[in-house]
Amino acid sequence: NGELTLGENIADIGGVSIAYEALQRRIRKHPEINVKMDGLTPDQRFFIGWAQGWRMNMRDQTLKWQVSNDPHSPDNFRAQLPVYVHESFEKVFGELSKKGNTKVKKIKIW
């Protein structure tokens, strides 16, 4: 229910943007931390970490209740939507960001 979840979806998009900007400021202040770890840049680890934070299993009955009553989108959408619409996601992952995804308009909330 897009009307029910709109406010929280906007909050998630804003949260990703604020957190990503905080990472960028930290890297500018301490460029020595801008190194790959396990083959991933700090920016890539940021987006992966965001998605990992939303991992969970949910029973179908619980999911049906959630989409009808909870102002939060299901976790798999909360993991994906805010990063797909983030202006830096495609820059960070390049062609990998486009695999299996339809073209998503990039937006900036704040």
Image (cartoon, rainbow, N blue to C red):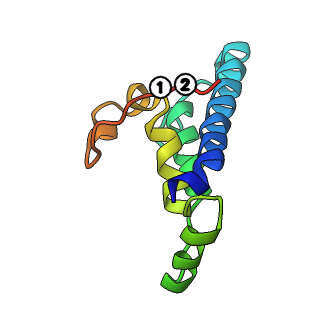
x then y, percent, for residue 55: 56, 64
On residue 108, the disc is 2
- Residue 27 against residue 36 in the figure, above or below: above
Q: Residue at x 60, y 56 (%)?
A: 4
Quarter of the image for residue 73 reads bottom right
Choose between 33 and 103: the one closer to the eye. Answer: 103
Q: Are marks 2 and 1 in contact (CB under 8 Å)?
A: yes
Q: Residue at x 33, y 30 (%)?
A: 94
Quadrant, the C terminus: top right
Q: Residue at x 38, y 31 (%)?
A: 105
x then y, percent, for residue 63: 53, 76
- Amino acid at the residue labelled 1: Glu
How many numbered circles are shown? Answer: 2
Q: CA distance from mark 2 to mark 1?
A: 7 Å
- Amino acid at the residue labelled 2: Lys
Please tell me whether mark 2 or mark 1 is closer to you in this view: 2
Q: Residue at x 51, y 53 (%)?
A: 2
Quarter of the image for residue 104 reads top left
On residue 87, the disc is 1
Residue 39 seen by the camera:
no
Question: Secondary structure under badge 1?
Answer: loop
